Amino acid sequence: MTRREREALQRKTDILQAAEEVFSQKGFHYASMEEVARQAEFSVGTLYNFFKNKDELYAEMLHWKVDLFEPIIKKALQTGDTPLDRIRNFFFTRFDVVWDNPKFFRIYYHESMGTHYDHKAGFTPEVMKRYELFMEHLAGEFRAGVEAGQFADKSVEMMVIIFEGALHQSVLRLQRNPNAKRDKQAEKDLFDLLLSGFAAKPNNN
Amino acid sequence: MTRREREALQRKTDILQAAEEVFSQKGFHYASMEEVARQAEFSVGTLYNFFKNKDELYAEMLHWKVDLFEPIIKKALQTGDTPLDRIRNFFFTRFDVVWDNPKFFRIYYHESMGTHYDHKAGFTPEVMKRYELFMEHLAGEFRAGVEAGQFADKSVEMMVIIFEGALHQSVLRLQRNPNAKRDKQAEKDLFDLLLSGFAAKPNNN
Amino acid sequence: MTRREREALQRKTDILQAAEEVFSQKGFHYASMEEVARQAEFSVGTLYNFFKNKDELYAEMLHWKVDLFEPIIKKALQTGDTPLDRIRNFFFTRFDVVWDNPKFFRIYYHESMGTHYDHKAGFTPEVMKRYELFMEHLAGEFRAGVEAGQFADKSVEMMVIIFEGALHQSVLRLQRNPNAKRDKQAEKDLFDLLLSGFAAKPNNN
Amino acid sequence: MTRREREALQRKTDILQAAEEVFSQKGFHYASMEEVARQAEFSVGTLYNFFKNKDELYAEMLHWKVDLFEPIIKKALQTGDTPLDRIRNFFFTRFDVVWDNPKFFRIYYHESMGTHYDHKAGFTPEVMKRYELFMEHLAGEFRAGVEAGQFADKSVEMMVIIFEGALHQSVLRLQRNPNAKRDKQAEKDLFDLLLSGFAAKPNNN
DNA sequence: AATGAATGAGGCTTCATTCAT
DNA sequence: CATGAATGAAGCCTCATTCAT
């Protein structure tokens, strides 16, 4: 990569960062290109040298971030000796990633959890597909865990739903409280509860 | 209530219904007042006789629907002999309500799950407060269940998170698939899995 | 037509008139919608209640004017006892129409004589087709004149070209001189010259 | 001229050629400097080293082409033994020039026939003056022809109008049909008809 | 109360032009 | 001279809101 190309990439990244900042604060519709430009310390026109329009800037910003996280959480799902270990790893790494990128995950949840009204901006089908694939990998681990006797012989799809739901729900909880501090013990408790279930254990005589 | 008042209320409800229809299809920002007016078979001006502005129309529509559901799910959480029964009731009733109002819940999840960018439209703090209260009631039932020996002696806050998360996540799954049909067995399996947990049961030989 | 419809039509016509004024002075590209709105004593938004966009406003304005002229010159081409009479009538009526609508014909010649770069604004193919049809009617009259022995037995297509060319050229000449006054004698001379040709008549001593 | 100067001139000519290409395809307003630069295989900045701005580039391109044609058609108007011969020569040479430069004449007619809305770009008054002068030369030839008994003793200004009008009109006709092929016989017929006029000749018994 | 035309602020986008390298 | 990224003024268009009827 030439120096010129490197610099251009740097500028593009600067704009993406500014976009993340502004979009995460105001949301897509209440953020203006002028605001993103100001945040990036560029003029509006410059944004259009890098991105075709607002929708595309938004979409590229989302992809850029997703691409940063994907390898991290992918690796986490592959690290550990047993399926349970890998899933545990994955679970806590998901929290790591969220806490490392609080701004982005304000947007992420708005986009991925809510239904998609807008077919121009927002996650592309391609990104959604990648998420689905991820969920299948996760399901695969659960399945392996079932076979290994670590997990109960129940629907792995349901496990994925509960697992993801619990994760998202707790992140949403934290996001609603701007003063929330990370509580790793709570994360562990959550994971344990997922494993053990709500029900009181039988005969603990 | 006079005839005049009754008619006015009817017209207002007609507009709210139209708003639900249009907002759920297009989302707040891509829906126009003109579109809502057309759907309601009124003119734009009339909308402004009933609602101060678009934000307020949106907010009132959300409240109107929430007010419809609240007694239903509130009652469900009070119906049953044991905490577990009441929670089970509550769980399935939540699904009932979602399946009875698919349009609204497209919006609901967009609003409640995503973070709130917009302080004008969307759920008001008051509605959020009511939701929180509800969760506390739910937590209360879990607590009662713990004391009654039905639930494990673990954090009831975590149980609420897992419970709500699983519910939301499964609804989101269904919403992403427009051809999805309701599967009550799956709902039951989900509930059972919440109770029993993912982990394989220790050798109960 | 209801009163409301009549008034709407009036307003639309007012806007078209303003558009004619502004476009004829500045040309399509140097005229702004804001300027047309000001001329029409409306706000910009109102223009868009009547016309989808700038291109369409321009096109509709052209059509509106063309539709006003067409019956006049069509009738002229049908008035007179012989083909020569009718063509003479047509010729002078064309001048009448131009002198009655100097503003519009600044645009008209820009659009119709120049080549069309812009496929959105400008004369639509439909209007061009109508012009072509008109030229065929004119050719028909020439043909009739040939058969009647009034015109030389030469290519009527060429006659049409010379006829139209002479007309356009003299109008352009006049348009270039903003102080030009109409000179009906010159128009007659021009017509006579078209009939008699440039060449000296053979010695009819 | 030094090598440096020669090279500079060459580059300037390259840009003018590119400008002709692009402007003739898209028209002044729909062509961008970036497009001209790409066509010229230079960067935009370089264009501004040679031309002050877009308007001037356009004007210089027009002048450059006009300067190329002028000597050719000037010479044609001076070649021939009689006024009629010279005018005939001129007439056909005008067609030669048009057929040799179809691209340019798309612009030429748009600029010269239409009225000038734009006082920055387009033909400068100076070029228009030169055109007028040319028409006066032509008129002079007609006058000489009248005196020589070759032309009828009628207004030479009218003859010029008809002559130029016929020429322009037939070129426009051809430009509207992109598949048109040159038809020299038609050109001759046109010229003959100009001379003889439309009217049937009186009894040549 | 209902209407719907008029309003105009606000946002997106383009592109001629500049200037540091 | 050549480059091409940066600039920002300018223009089109939308749509929530108002108000005279």
Image: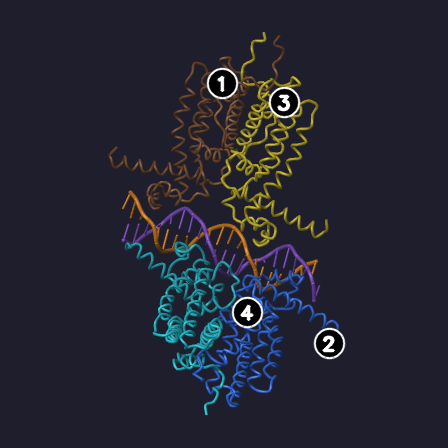
Chain colours: A cyan, B blue, C yellow, D brown, E purple, F orange
- Label 1: element kind: helix
Q: Quadrant of the C terminus of chain B?
A: bottom left
**Mark 4 vs mark 1, CA separation in Å:** 82 Å
Q: Is residue B6 left or right of residue D187?
A: right
Q: Are marks 2 and 3 on the same chain?
A: no
Q: Which-is-in-front pick, marks 3 and 1?
A: 3
Amino acid at the residue labelled 3: Arg
**Mark 4 vs mark 2, CA separation in Å:** 30 Å
- Label 2: element kind: loop
Amino acid at the residue labelled 2: Met
Please name the residue shown 53% across and 86% down the image: B140
Q: Nearer the viewer, residue B69 or B177?
A: B177
Discs 4, 3 touching: Cβ within 8 Å: no
Task: Look at mark 3 in the image and give the residue it sits on.
Answer: C143
Q: How many marks?
A: 4
Task: Look at mark 1 in the image and give the residue it sits on.
Answer: D143
Q: Chain of mark 2?
A: B
Q: Chain of mark 4?
A: B
Q: Which-is-in-front pick, marks 1 and 2?
A: 2
Q: Chain of mark 1?
A: D
Task: Look at mark 4 in the image and give the residue it sits on.
Answer: B121
Q: Residues within 10 Å of mark 1 (few under 14, many from 20)?
A: many
Task: Look at mark 2 in the image and give the residue it sits on.
Answer: B1
Q: Which-is-in-front pick, marks 4 and 1?
A: 4
Find residue A121 and report its horizontal and vertical position in percent: 48, 60
Q: Is residue B205 left or right of residue B36?
A: left
Find residue B162 and report its horizontal and vertical position in percent: 48, 78
Q: Nearer the viewer, residue A190 or A60?
A: A190
Find residue D120 and report its horizontal and vertical position in percent: 44, 41
**Mark 2 vs mark 3, CA separation in Å:** 84 Å
